[in-house]
C-alpha cells in the first residue's frame, strides 16, 4: 500500500467570520510555514465571490520563490451558525502542500480533495495525510476534445470560463478541471488556479473556472458544445494539434505528469509545453473517423436499438463502436432526457445473451456516459434502476462500477450487488472517517448505514485500517444519531445497538471516562440523540446522572443565546438540589372519602334493614289507600261521561 500512496505535510487555515464580525478573516491556521497574514493574502487574492450553491472547491497556488511554491485546495461550505443579522456565513477550509513534495510523486486534484474534504478545522499539532498517487489510466477515460481544447486555450494570456448551468454537479466539475490539468505539464500546476464556480460579474484571478454567464474578457467554453480555437491563438492551435496526434492518452498523461519543472502561463512561456509534447510525439490512431454532423447521439442510439431488435450482430457492433466514440468526444447535456426515454422504451440496458460480453459491456458504458455523464451518484443509480425495472445484470454492474464516482453510497450500493469481495474492496478504499462523513452528509439509506457500522466494527476488532480521524468524525456527526433516527424510525432498540458499537469503535471496550463522555456529547452543536444519551449513560456506569449534568448540560447552557441574568439563574438552579418538603405541624387534613357505587348501594340496604316494622306496615297501608282512591276517581269519571252522553241523546229530536 505504501507504493500507491504519498505522505504529505499539510498547512491549513480556517477562513470565515464569527456571528458578530463584519468582514471575513482567518479564524485559525497552522503554526508552521505560512503565517496568518500570508493565508489572508492568498484567500483574498483568489476570492470567487459569494456562491449561490455550496459546497464549492477552488484550486489555489501560492509562492514565487524556488522551494516556496504550494498547491492548495479551498473548500467553501455553509456554516451552521448565521451572522448577527441572520445571514448565512460561508466558511472556507484551506489546505496546501509544498510543491516540492509532489515533484516526484504526482497526485491529482481529485485525490487531494477526496482526502481533505473530511478533515475538520482547526487541527491540533501537525497535519499529515496519505493520498493516492495519480492514476493515468483513470484520467485517460475522461479525456475528450473539449478537455483538450480547454487545456490548449489556457496557454494564452486570457482566463478560460466554462459556461454551464447548475445541473452540472460538483463531482463532474471537479473531474473536468482535473482532466484539463492532466493535459498540461505537471509543473504548470504550480501556477494554475481553478474553481468549480466563480461570479460572472466579479473581478477575480482564477485562470480556469465554471460560471453561469459568458465573460467578454475571457475564452468561453460552452459546456457540451464544440470549442473552436481562434486562428489568432496560434500556440493553442499547435498544442491542440499535438494533443490530438497522441493515440495513447494514458501514456500521454503519464508523460505530462513527469514534466514537473516549474512552468507558468501566457505567451512567453507557451513554448515549454509544446516542447514537452514534441518529445513524445506519436502518429495518430488509424481507423477512427472524424466526427460527422449527422451522428447525433439520439440517431445512433435508435439505430443501435433497431439492430439489437433484429439481432444483427455486425450492425450492432458497428453502432456500438460509433457510440463509444461519441460518448468520449461529445457532451450531450441538453439531450439527456430524450436519451433516457429511448433507453427506457427500447430496453437498451437489458441483457443481450446472443451478443459477445465485451461488446455488451462496452455498449452499457457508452450509453451510461452519454445519458448520465461520467460521474456516478446515488441519484444517477436510482434513475438507472427506474430504467432497468428489475435486477441489474452482471455486465451492467461492471459498467457502473467503472464509472467515476465520489459518492460512497453509490459505489457501496453497486459493490454490494456484485459480490462480497467487491464490497470489501470498495470499503477498503475508504477511510473510516470518509465512511462516517458519507453517512452523515449524503442521502444514505438503512442498508448503507448498516454496512458502515459493520465495517467499522470489523476494523476495530481486527485493528485493520483504523485511522486517527475516525473518533473525531464520529464526534462531529453526533455518532450518526440523527441518521440512525431517520433510517430506523421507531426501532429504538436497533438505534441503541448500533450506537453502542460506534462508541466502542471510537473509545474502546472499557467504561467511558469523563473525557470520553464530554467529547461524545459535545462534539457537535446539535443536541445528542436519545440513543446516544442512553448509550453514553449505559457505558459510563454509576454516577452517569451527575456526569451528564456536569460535563454536558452545563456546557450546552453556555452555548445557548441567552441573557447573562437568565444564564446565571439556570446555573444556580442546576447547581442546587431541590430541598425536601419539611413536615407540617398538627394532624394532617384528610380528604373526604369517595365511596364507590357498590359501597353506596350497601349503605342504602343497611339503612332499610334498620327501619322499624311499624314504619314498613304504615307504608303498606298508605299505598293501599292511594290505590283505592285512584279507583274511585276513575269510576266517577267514567260515570260522568256516560251521563253526558245520555243527556245529549234525549235532547236530540
Image (cartoon, rainbow, N blue to C red):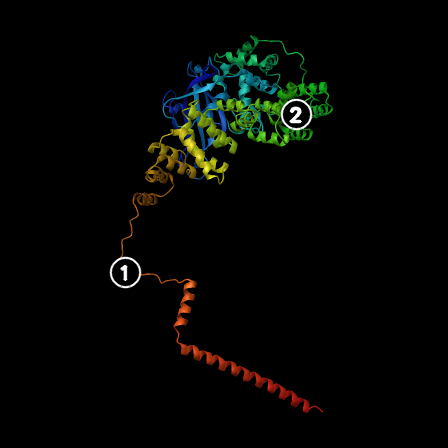
Q: Nearer the viewer, residue 183 or 532?
A: 532
Dividing the picture into quarters, in which one does residue 400 lie?
Answer: top right
Q: Secondary structure at mark 2?
A: loop
**Horizontal and vertical percent position of residue 615:** 41, 78
Going by the picture, which residue comes out furthest to the top? Answer: 279
Which numbered disc flags the more N-terminal residue, 2 or 1?
Answer: 2
Residue at numbered disc 1: 587
Is 633 drawn above or below residue 563 in the view shown? below
**Horizontal and vertical percent position of residue 279:** 55, 8
Dividing the picture into quarters, in which one does residue 8 lie?
Answer: top left
> Separation of disc 2 and disc 1 at Cα?
90 Å
**Is 255 situated left or right of 313 in this image?**
left
Q: Secondary structure at mark 1?
A: loop
Q: Which mark is residue 351?
A: 2
Q: Does residue 243 show up?
A: yes
**Horizontal and vertical percent position of residue 416:** 54, 27
At label 1, counting other C-alpha atoms closer than 10 Å, the crowd grade (few under 14, some 14-19, many 20 or more) is: few
Amino acid at each position: 500500500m505504501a507504493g500507491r500512496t504519498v505522505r504529505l505535510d499539510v498547512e491549513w487555515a480556517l477562513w470565515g467570520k464569527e456571528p458578530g464580525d463584519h468582514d471575513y478573516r482567518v479564524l485559525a491556521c497552522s503554526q508552521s510555514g505560512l503565517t496568518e497574514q500570508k493565508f489572508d493574502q492568498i484567500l483574498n487574492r483568489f476570492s470567487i465571490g459569494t456562491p449561490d450553491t455550496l459546497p464549492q472547491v477552488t484550486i489555489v497556488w501560492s509562492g514565487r520563490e524556488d522551494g516556496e511554491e504550494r498547491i492548495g485546495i479551498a473548500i467553501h461550505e455553509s456554516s451552521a451558525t448565521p451572522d448577527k443579522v441572520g445571514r448565512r456565513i460561508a466558511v472556507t477550509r484551506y489546505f496546501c502542500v509544498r510543491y516540492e513534495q509532489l515533484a516526484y510523486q504526482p497526485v491529482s486534484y481529485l485525490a487531494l480533495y477526496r482526502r481533505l474534504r473530511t478533515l475538520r478545522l482547526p487541527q491540533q499539532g501537525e497535519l499529515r495525510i496519505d493520498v493516492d498517487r495519480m492514476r493515468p489510466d483513470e484520467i485517460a477515460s475522461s479525456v475528450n476534445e473539449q478537455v483538450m481544447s480547454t487545456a490548449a486555450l489556457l496557454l494564452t494570456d486570457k482566463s478560460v470560463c466554462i459556461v454551464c448551468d447548475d445541473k452540472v454537479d460538483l463531482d463532474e466539475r471537479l473531474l473536468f478541471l482535473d482532466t484539463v490539468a492532466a493535459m498540461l505539464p505537471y509543473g504548470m500546476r504550480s501556477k494554475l488556479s481553478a474553481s468549480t464556480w466563480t461570479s460572472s460579474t466579479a473581478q477575480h484571478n482564477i485562470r480556469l473556472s465554471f460560471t453561469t454567464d459568458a465573460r467578454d474578457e475571457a475564452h468561453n467554453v460552452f459546456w457540451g458544445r464544440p470549442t473552436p480555437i481562434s486562428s489568432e491563438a496560434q500556440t493553442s492551435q499547435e498544442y491542440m494539434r499535438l494533443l490530438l496526434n497522441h493515440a495513447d492518452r494514458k501514456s500521454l498523461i503519464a508523460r505530462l505528469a513527469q514534466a514537473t519543472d516549474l512552468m507558468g502561463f501566457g505567451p512567453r512561456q507557451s513554448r515549454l509545453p509544446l516542447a514537452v509534447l514534441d518529445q513524445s510525439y506519436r502518429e495518430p490512431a488509424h481507423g477512427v473517423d472524424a466526427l460527422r454532423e449527422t451522428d447525433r447521439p439520439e440517431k445512433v442510439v435508435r439505430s443501435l436499438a433497431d439492430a439489437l431488435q433484429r439481432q444483427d450482430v455486425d450492425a450492432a457492433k458497428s453502432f456500438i463502436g460509433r457510440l463509444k466514440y461519441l460518448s468520449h468526444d461529445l457532451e450531450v447535456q441538453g439531450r439527456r432526457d430524450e436519451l433516457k426515454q429511448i433507453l427506457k422504451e427500447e430496453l437498451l440496458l437489458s441483457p443481450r445473451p446472443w451478443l459477445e460480453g465485451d461488446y455488451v459491456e462496452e455498449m452499457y458504458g457508452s450509453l451510461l456516459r452519454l445519458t448520465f455523464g461520467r460521474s456516478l451518484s446515488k441519484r444517477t443509480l436510482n434513475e438507472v434502476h427506474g430504467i432497468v425495472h428489475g435486477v441489474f445484470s452482471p455486465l451492467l454492474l461492471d459498467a457502473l462500477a467503472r464509472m467515476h464516482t465520489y459518492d460512497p453510497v453509490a459505489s457501496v450500493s453497486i459493490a454490494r450487488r456484485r459480490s462480497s469481495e467487491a464490497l470489501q474492496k470498495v470499503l477498503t478504499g475508504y477511510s473510516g472517517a470518509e465512511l462516517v462523513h458519507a453517512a452523515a452528509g449524503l442521502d444514505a439509506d438503512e442498508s448503507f448505514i448498516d454496512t458502515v457500522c459493520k465495517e467499522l466494527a470489523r476494523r476495530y476488532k481486527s485493528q485493520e485500517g483504523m485511522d486517527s480521524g475516525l473518533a473525531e468524525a464520529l464526534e462531529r456527526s453526533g455518532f450518526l444519531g440523527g441518521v440512525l433516527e431517520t433510517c430506523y424510525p421507531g426501532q429504538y432498540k436497533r438505534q441503541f445497538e448500533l450506537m453502542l458499537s460506534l462508541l466502542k469503535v471510537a473509545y474502546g471496550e472499557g467504561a467511558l471516562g469523563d473525557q470520553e463522555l464530554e467529547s461524545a456529547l459535545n462534539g457537535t452543536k446539535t443536541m445528542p440523540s436519545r440513543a446516544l444519551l442512553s448509550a453514553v449513560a449505559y457505558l459510563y456506569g454509576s454516577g452517569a446522572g451527575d456526569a451528564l449534568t456536569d460535563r454536558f448540560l452545563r456546557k450546552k447552557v453556555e452555548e445557548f443565546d441567552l441573557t447573562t441574568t437568565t444564564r446565571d439563574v439556570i446555573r444556580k438552579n442546576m447547581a442546587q438540589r431541590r430541598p425536601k418538603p419539611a413536615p407540617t405541624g398538627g394532624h394532617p387534613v384528610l380528604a373526604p372519602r369517595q365511596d364507590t357505587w357498590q359501597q353506596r348501594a350497601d349503605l342504602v340496604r343497611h339503612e332499610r334493614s334498620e327501619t322499624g316494622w311499624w314504619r314498613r306496615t304504615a307504608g303498606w297501608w298508605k299505598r293501599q289507600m292511594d290505590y283505592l282512591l285512584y279507583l274511585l276517581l276513575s269510576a266517577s269519571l267514567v260515570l260522568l261521561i256516560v251521563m253526558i252522553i245520555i243527556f245529549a241523546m234525549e235532547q236530540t229530536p
